[in-house]
Image (spheres, grey):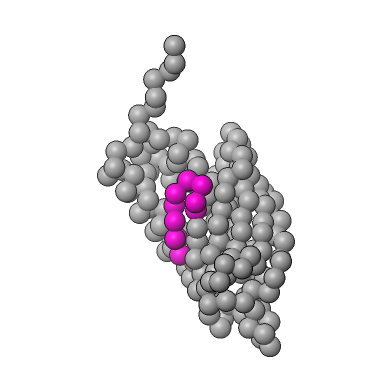
Amino acid sequence: MTAPAAPHRDAAEQARLHATLVELFDQRIAFNALLGVRVEALVPGDVRLRLDMRPDLVGHYLYGRLHGGVVSSVLDAVGGLALMVAIAERHPADTAQQVLQRFAKMGTIDLRVDFLRPGLGRHFVGHGEVTRLGGRVGSTQMRLLNDEGTLIATSAAAYVVA
C-alpha cells in the first residue's frame, strides 16, 4: 500500500511563493540588487539568474572583463536559489511564508569556482542545479555563460540548509 501523496500548494499560493522568491533575490538581498542580479527562471532543474554587464562590474580595466568576485557571487547566489526551489518542492504543502522560514538558517559552507574564460559579454546567465539535498546540507553545481552561450565559469558548492 502506498502512502497518500502530500497535498500541494494551490496555484495562488504557488504564485505567491514565486513572487516572494523573485522579490527576495532581486530586491531584498541588497548585494544581489547592488550587482543587478535578476531572477530569470525558477523551475526545478532550470534555475537561472541574469546579470547585465556594466562598467562598475569590470575587474580588468584594460579588457573590460567581469570581475572574478562578481562571477563567484552570481554563482553562489544561483546555487542558493536552486536549493530554495528544491526545498520548496520538498515541502509542497507549505505556504510561501512557511517556505521562507525554512531559509532562515541557510548559508554557504563551501564554494569552489573554476574560471574557464575571460568574463566578456553584454550579459551573463547563471544556471544552478541541486545535486543533493540532505536534511542538513545541500550540494549544487552551477555554470555562468555569457550572452553568446560561452561557458565562462563553473562552480560547486555546499550549503547548510537546517
**Figure quadrant of residue 153:** bottom right
Query: Which region shows up in magenta?
Result: 38-47
Note whether residue 155 is visible: yes
Q: Quadrant of the C terminus?
A: top right
**Figure quadrant of residue 8:** top left
Note whether residue 35 is visible: no
Q: Is residue 70 magenta?
A: no
Q: Is residue 143 left or right of residue 46?
A: right
| Residue 37 placement (x, y as % from top left) | 49, 66
Q: Quadrant of the N terminus?
A: top left
Q: Is residue 123 above or below residue 141?
A: below
Q: Is residue 125 left or right of residue 40?
A: right
Seen at 44% across and 56% down, the residue is 41
Which residue occupies the foreground of this view, 28 or 138?
A: 138
Q: Is residue 149 above or below residue 59?
A: above
Seen at 33% across and 37% down, the residue is 9
| Residue 99 placement (x, y as % from top left) | 43, 42
Seen at 32% across and 48% down, the residue is 15
